[in-house]
Amino acid sequence: MKVTTETRRAGREVVLELVFRPLSNALVPPLRRLGVPPPAVVLANAATGLVAALLLARGELVAAAVLLQVKTLLDNTDGQLARAADRVTLAGRYLDTIADLVVNAALFAALGYVTEQPLLAIAAFLALTLVLAADFSTTELYREARGVPTRQPPPTGRAAERMLASIYGAVFSPLDRAVRGLAARRFEGSGGYDRVTVTVLANLGLSSQLVVLGVCLVLGVPSAYLWFVLACLAALVPLQLRAEREARQTAPRSVTR
């Protein structure tokens, strides 16, 4: 199947493409010359996010907001560095995703503490996890339906990779299966998710989420972000219904004689 421009461009996150990717592209050459391994960048990204969570819990909102953007920059640099150095591994991909989950948990714990709304923070954390899972899985389904699935590096069988795979599978595989099961039931006989759906979901992704959180912190309204995340989760319902309607309208019609 021919790879179209639509397929390549679907799912692009605006803030990532306009801000963080150009900055990460500028960071990659010096890091590569220094021989910095991609997993070290992942760990630096996680450490930065955890420090941001600590500052947030202490009420240092602006400092936390700044560090969150640094965290996002590093989060987008590790993958670029791995590809540039031809060091893309399954372990690295698992580590990156798990590190994001740990940092997100710390951030929402800090938000619950600083806003004195722990139950709202827990609900928002679960909501964000579901939104990010929907973003990932629908994009993968979109690409697979068009014959361009994401290439996975071969497994090495190393102990660290197996451990990370076990953690990843326990946390994220059920979410992926749920999204794929929903798609199988709701899009049977049609083309599945369309470009608009995956693009909207991409712009609810983690880079955009941390920018919104940063803005809320600078404005001194951290609780507003918790409600924003819940609104993102609620938006999945009309987005799904719209995608199903579009799929029905574009599905090939059987011709009766």
Image (cartoon, rainbow, N blue to C red):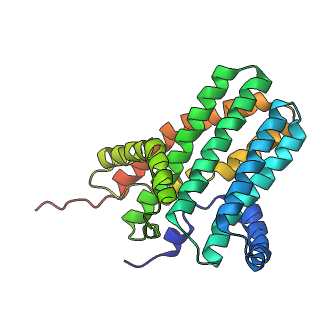
In the figure, residue 108 lies in which quadrant?
Answer: top right
Q: Which image quarter holds the C terminus?
A: bottom left
Expressed as whole percent of the image width and height from the top left, the position of residue 116 reads: 76, 19
Foreground residue among 159 and 249? 159
117 lies above or below 255: above
Q: Residue at x 67, y 71 (%)?
A: 81
Q: Residue at x 80, y 76 (%)?
A: 30
Q: Is residue 237 visible?
A: yes
Q: Residue at x 45, y 55 (%)?
A: 162
Residue found at the far left of this picture: 257
Q: Is residue 39 left or right of residue 179?
A: right
133 lies above or below 148: above
Q: In the rendered picture of this protein, how many numbered marks are placed on residues?
A: 0
Q: Is residue 16 visible?
A: no
Expressed as whole percent of the image width and height from the top left, the position of residue 137 reads: 46, 52
Q: Is residue 184 left or right of residue 211?
A: left
242 lies above or below 148: above
Expressed as whole percent of the image width and height from the top left, the position of residue 85 reads: 64, 78
In the figure, residue 199 lies in which quadrant?
Answer: bottom right
Residue found at the far front of this picture: 159
Q: Which image quarter holds the N terminus?
A: bottom left
Q: Is residue 7 left or right of residue 59?
A: left
Q: Residue at x 76, y 41 (%)?
A: 213
Foreground residue among 105 and 119? 105
Expressed as whole percent of the image width and height from the top left, the position of residue 66 reads: 85, 48
